[in-house]
Amino acid sequence: MVKIKICGITRLQDALDACHAGADALGFNFSRMSPRVIAPEQARAIIEKLPPLVQSAGIFVDQSPEEINAICRFCKLQIAQLHSEQYNPDHARSITEARVIKVFRPEENFAVEEVLAFAKKSGVNAFLFDAFRPDMAGGTGETIGRSLAARIFNELENSCYAILAGGLNETNVGEAIRHVQPYGVDTSSGVEMLPGIKDSKKIHSFIKTVHLASS
């Protein structure tokens, strides 16, 4: 079964809706540049009320490893998602309070050797692929080209846990899963009414579609 992460959580009710619908993980964005930014104190209050088998992930863009470790420890995050080109294998190895997911935003000429080299140098075995847009680090609502995504995921088969993101919603995630066959999928804007404000019907429909496509 394809794993599901609902990202950009800012409200307890949205978090619980996602959990009840069957989400495997929830993402909390600590980037100061994001319209979905959440304070560590708010994130911790939500995370403390999550079911025990739902993972919590912190999204980081501009923070140092020291700050990331401090937030992971304070919020009791299981995952640190490094969502910027500035993060290198040394940064990843410095994250000791949570497991790391490294994000790549591939363009058409993207070479998977870049991922494999990062994995070898850092020990990271999970990578998320999001749509590239120069002015935004994530949450763009844009999709990765189908042929590009299929090539990347096919070339990475069995070498790491590859997660697909970028503009996924209830109308396109089923086809994306069948075409790309990812380990997991990640959505934020695809289940929202407004940035950071989720739509319960969209969450449930998205997760149902993922389960049907991957069963």
Image (cartoon, grey):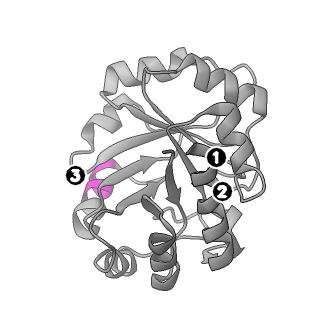
Categorize mark 3 by other alpha carbons within 10 Å: few (<14), some (14-19), many (20+): some
Element under disc 3: loop
Residue 119 among magenta residues: no
Place of residue 24 in the rendered image (x, y in percent of width and height, measured from the top left) = 43, 58
Is there any visible trace of residue 56 in the rendered image? yes
Categorize mark 2 by other alpha carbons within 10 Å: few (<14), some (14-19), many (20+): some
Q: In this view, does 143 lie above or below 21?
A: above
Place of residue 191 in the rendered image (x, y in percent of width and height, measured from the top left) = 67, 68
Q: Residue furthest bottom?
A: 13
Kind of residue at badge 1: Ala
Give the CA distance from mark 2 to mark 1: 6 Å
- Quarter of the figure with the C terminus: top right
Task: Check if mark 2's residue and mark 1's residue have beta carbons within 8 Å.
Answer: yes
Residue drawn at the location 38% of the way across and 75% of the way down: 43
Give the CA distance from mark 3 to mark 2: 33 Å
Kind of residue at badge 3: Glu
Question: What is the magenta range?
Answer: 65-69
- Judge by depth and name the residue closer to the eye, 84 or 10: 10
Left or right of 38: which side holds 93? left
Task: Check if mark 3's residue and mark 2's residue have beta carbons within 8 Å.
Answer: no
Element under disc 2: helix
Residue drawn at the location 77% of the way across and 33% of the way down: 146
Closest to the camera, between mark 3 and mark 1, is 1
The residue beneath circle 3 is: 97
Is there any visible trace of residue 199 in the rendered image? no
Residue drawn at the location 68% of the way across and 71% of the way down: 202
Place of residue 1 in the rendered image (x, y in percent of width and height, measured from the top left) = 48, 45
The residue beneath circle 2 is: 209
Q: In this view, does 4 lie above or below 132?
A: below
